[in-house]
Image: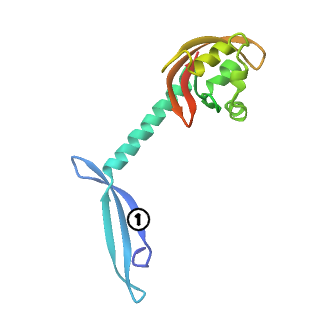
Amino acid sequence: SQVLDGELYRGDFKWDFGDEIRHFDISFNPIRIDGSVIGYSEVCVDITERTLTEKELKESKQKYKRLVERSPGITYIYGTKSGSLFCSKRVKDVLGLTTDQLKHDPFIWTNSIHPDDLPRVRKVFEGRETDDTFDIEYRVKDVNGIWHWLRDFCISIKEENDERIIEGLAI
């Protein structure tokens, strides 16, 4: 009735064909002559592959999120010019920093590295001693002024917009 009243109707439907389930995007467009609806046109597109791909992507994102959130270490993405681009919530348990603090002060972690360790860490992060990965230990001061030893594993490094982007795990 929606189409016969002159309105477009569109929806996704799932049909069970017995041996498989297919997903379709269906639209009904009213056909008018002199302003009166005399019928409708129907377009049906099989969107099964897209629907299954979207479902797989959603499941993959959920698995990744669980892995990051439940990791005993701090998962991070760091830009040598931008500072902290992402940090898992575990940073709160280890260093007392919130993810909001890291967003507002992206170099707070770097600025908390022990002064004796900072030149060595900077050298590694800037790539003078590494090519694609690194494994380094250094001290970081938490929000209460207590020093913690972290072992920082680089998972990947890429160059992006004249900046080195490092994905890592600090335990």
* Quarter of the figure that contains the N terminus: bottom left
Quarter of image, res 81? top right
Q: How is the image coloured?
A: rainbow
Q: Residue at point 58% right, 26% down?
A: 76
Which amino acid is tagged 1? Arg
> Are there few (<14), some (14-19), or many (20+) residues within 10 Å of tag 1?
some
Query: Among all residues in the image, which is located at the extreme right?
Result: 145
Tell how many labels.
1
Q: Residue at point 44% right, 40% down?
A: 58
Seen from the viewer's position, the closer of residues 98 and 140 is 140
Q: Residue at point 58% right, 15% down?
A: 171
Seen from the viewer's position, the closer of residues 114 and 71 is 114
Residue 73 seen in the figure = no
Mark 1: secondary structure: strand
In the image, taking residue 15 as reference, residue 70 lies left or right, namely right
Query: Among all residues in the image, which is located at the extreme left?
Result: 19
Residue 11, position as x, y percentages in the image: 40, 61
Residue 152 seen in the figure = yes
Q: Which residue is mark 1?
A: 10
Seen from the viewer's position, the closer of residues 153 and 157 is 157
Q: Residue at point 35% right, 57% down?
A: 13
Residue 88, position as x, y percentages in the image: 60, 28
